[in-house]
Image (tube, grey):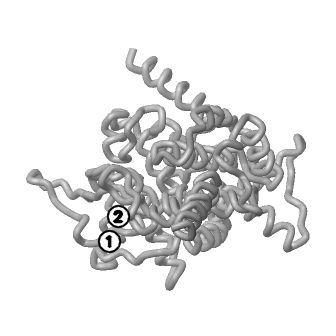
Amino acid sequence: KEKARKKAEEKKRIEDEKNRLIWPFLVQFVDDIRSGARKIGSDDYAPGTCKAWKSFIGVYEGFDPLHKFGWADIDRAFVSRYINYLQKHGYMAKVVNKHLTNLKALINAAFIDGVHDNQRAAALIVKKKIEDRDKAVEIYLTEEELQALYEMPLSGKKEHIRDVFLIGCYTCQRVSDYNNLNADNFETTRKGTRIIRLVQQKTKTEVTIPILNENLITICEKYGYNIPKANEQVLNRYIKDVLKDLSDQLPSLKEKVPTKLTMKQKEALRKEKKEPETDLNGNVIVPRYDCVTSHTARRTGITNMYLSHKYTILQMMHVSGHKTQKTFMDYIKLSSEEIADEIAAMSKKESDMW
């Protein structure tokens, strides 16, 4: 009996120690997300979310390599130390906020599961307000640039990447959605409108996208509506190369824009032993073609829809799948000069009417 009692006490001590620490719960939490054992309501976590948690676990382990921090240790000083760690390692403000959001979600999940009773912990985590100067520049491609890209003679991998990217521009979707289209997504309404119907992977939102550009039909027919898939990292690399080649024909793609370098860009410069180019104010500048990523396609589609002035915000949100006007408007990537030009053009049009 004494032996059994001691064994039970040791088991409880080990379990209590495990529950006291953040790391074991984090590992189990991420494993459960990836396996489907932990869900959002009745839905599995989206692949992009699983990827984000995989990234988070790597970053957190760098912050807590000895796995010594417990739930009771989360106070104001802990949060400040975590933010300082992220900033010291060169993460941009937007990425810092993402990691803070994940930390807060982890704390809340553990609290709901009854693992800890630190009621103040989650409330201590407040995201930083991000100014434009804190972010990598986010651009969109103009209609002229898109058409030149569409008409560009390409073959092989570069042609596939270009076509997949253009499908993203013409549908206003995320790479996780425009990279996974197949013949089943294409339908025709009773009135004969050609549409793409899909459930967005990230938000599980069902969207119905009218096909408004004949280029999209031509690209889809080229592949018999079975669009080739493109790994996101490969797409990001190839589309920059394609647009760099196109910039010889379209100088607008060579224009330098101020930005913040990502960790990957900094690492690439370090390897090549190069210093970044800067403007007179000391801001890092890069050509526009070097700013294009898989997500530029979604921003491009939404911004060009907005600039057409043919659709209401509600109609455009129905296509993009945004739930709020604020998040939708974050995708409109117009410079202050472009907005001024728009206002002047609208004013002139109104004057001409009178």
User: Residue farthest to the bottom?
Assistant: 156
User: Residue farthest to the top?
Assistant: 354
User: Considering the numbered disc 2 on the image, is that residue within a helix, a strand or a loop?
Assistant: helix
- 15 vs 216, nearest the viewer: 15
Report the residue at 53% width, 51% height from top: 142
User: Considering the numbered disc 1 on the image, is that residue within a helix, a strand or a loop?
Assistant: helix
Q: Residues within 10 Å of mark 1 (few under 14, many from 20)?
A: many
- Asked if the residue at tag 1 contacts the one at tag 2, i.e. Cβ–Cβ closer than 8 Å, the answer is yes
In the image, residue 287 above or below residue 82: below
Q: Amino acid at mark 1?
A: Cys
> Which quadrant would residue 213 be assigned to in this image?
bottom left
* Residue 152 in view in this figure: yes
Q: Position of residue 232 (x, y in %)?
A: 53, 69
The residue that mark 1 highlights is: 220
Q: Position of residue 201 (x, y in %)?
A: 38, 58
User: Residue farthest to the front?
Assistant: 1
In the image, residue 22 above or below residue 330: below
Q: Position of residue 195 (x, y in %)?
A: 23, 57
Q: Amino acid at mark 2?
A: Leu
